[in-house]
Image: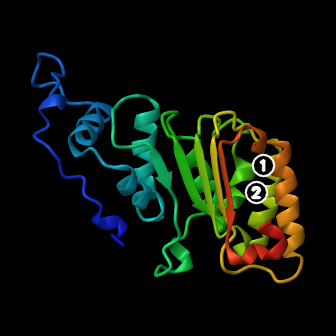
Amino acid sequence: MMAAEEVSLVPKGDGSSSEHSHGDDPNVPLSAEFALGLLLGHAQPSSMEISKLASDRRSYGLAWVILVSLKKKNVDLPFFDSLELSIHQELPLSVVMYPQKIALLLVSLPETTEKLSFPGEYAQFLELIPADALAFLQSLVVKDVLSSPDGILQLIFWMSWCDLIGLQHLHLDMGERGPEEDRDVYVQALAGGLTRSVVPQLKLFELYGRACGEKGTR
């Protein structure tokens, strides 16, 4: 997997479409916002590249700046339509993202974002975002749902009150591991929350993973 610091922001094209005049006076310095727009317009980072930046505390700030620029429509990145947050197993816990930072990142997502993916360990951010913050999503993927008891509870609670009016696809990977005790209770509670919220509108719902147990896979 490419490390965050290896994500390239080197221009991928000749940048001719991003050449804008910034006034007629060459002595007038470029504003930081305009300069950033030019840089991103040249680099055209993809969804995968931005996701790698966002998944690492060492490059999180750059990902946030990019998303804010997209949300404000200061730059057009046609190759960005999804964000996939992940936990780098090779990194120490000291560089894993805090829920507050993840929440700040997600409320900065542009409404053109179609898909969001995150691990169950990160579900604690859900209580920190407004109910309608992700209403524009079409697809949601949660991985290793049962890996974190606190994450399970947050996901159950969030699914019961969140506003996901645009959601069409929901994929819940319960994972290969999870609490042996009461895991069927967790799965049934999650199913109840989903039934009251997003399941009726879904075109595709997938629930899989050994950790969900026999009852959870029915």
Q: Which residue is mark 1?
A: 159
Colouring of the image: rainbow
Left or right? Give the position of 50 relative to 156: left
Q: Quadrant of residue 199?
A: top right
Left or right? Give the position of 34 relative to 125: left
* Residue 190 vs residue 29, the one in the foreground: 190
Please state the horizontal and vertical placement of residue 173, each as a whole percent of the image: 65, 66
As drawn, 51 above or below 111: below
Q: Quadrant of residue 217?
A: bottom right
Please state the horizontal and vertical placement of residue 96, each as a whole percent of the image: 54, 70
Q: Which residue is mark 2?
A: 155
Please state the horizontal and vertical placement of residue 36, each as a whole percent of the image: 29, 39
At 36% from the left edge and 65% from the top edge, which residue is drawn?
4
Left or right? Give the position of 79 relative to 27: right
At 90% from the left edge and 69% from the top edge, which residue is drawn?
185
Quarter of the picture holding the N terminus: bottom left
The residue carrying pointer 2 sits among few (fewer than 14), some (14 to 19) or many (20 or more) residues within 10 Å by Cα, namely many
At 25% from the left edge and 36% from the top edge, which residue is drawn?
35
Image marks 2 and 1: residues in contact by CB distance under 8 Å: yes
**Label 1: element kind:** helix
As drawn, 25 above or below 83: above
